[in-house]
Image (spheres, rainbow, N blue to C red):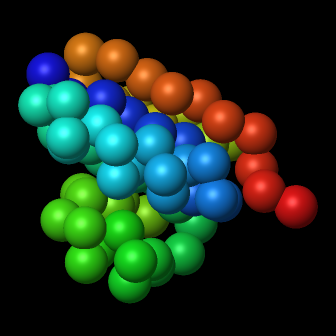
């Protein structure tokens, strides 16, 4: 199973840490690069959740989604 996480704030990063521990892969869609997520081995395509094409690309191969509001 692979899960898409949107929103890379504190909660999003924590979910990205926890999901692999439960045996699932994780993809995190974000507007800017994230060295923290990359260091965790998270696939991190760049894009905006307001862009349907970016979301569709990020969702490819995912079976679940955790859609979080933006931090801030």
Single out the residue that lies furthest toward the bottom: 35
Would residue 26 be found to the left or right of residue 1 on screen?
right
**Rendered location of residue 68, percent (x, y):** 66, 36
**In which quadrant will I find the N terminus?**
top left
Q: Which of 36 and 70 is in front in this view?
A: 36
Q: How many labels does the image show?
A: 0
Q: Please report the residue visible at 20 percent of the width from the left and 40 percent of the height from the top.
A: 21
**Rendered location of residue 13, percent (x, y):** 50, 57
* Residue 47 in view, yes or no: no
7 lies above or below 32: above
**Rendered location of residue 38, percent (x, y):** 28, 74
Q: Please report the residue visible at 75 percent of the width from the left and 39 percent of the height from the top.
A: 69
Q: Which of 12 and 46 is in front in this view?
A: 12
Single out the residue that lies furthest toward the right: 72
Q: Which of 60 and 63 is in front in this view?
A: 63
44 lies above or below 48: below
* Residue 14 in view, yes or no: yes
Would residue 21 be found to the left or right of residue 70 on screen?
left
6 lies above or below 67: below
Q: Hey, which quadrant is residue 20 in on the image? A: top left
**Rendered location of residue 59, percent (x, y):** 33, 31
Q: Please report the residue visible at 25 percent of the width from the left and 16 percent of the height from the top.
A: 63
Q: Please report the residue visible at 88 percent of the width from the left and 61 percent of the height from the top.
A: 72
């Amino acid at each position: 199973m692979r899960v898409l996480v949107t929103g890379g704030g504190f909660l999003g990063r924590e979910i990205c840490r926890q999901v692999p521990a439960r045996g699932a892969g994780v993809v995190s869609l974000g507007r800017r690069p994230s060295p923290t997520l990359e260091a965790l081995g998270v696939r991190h395509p760049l894009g905006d959740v307001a862009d349907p094409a970016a979301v569709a690309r990020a969702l490819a191969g995912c079976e679940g989604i955790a859609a979080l509001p933006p931090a801030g």
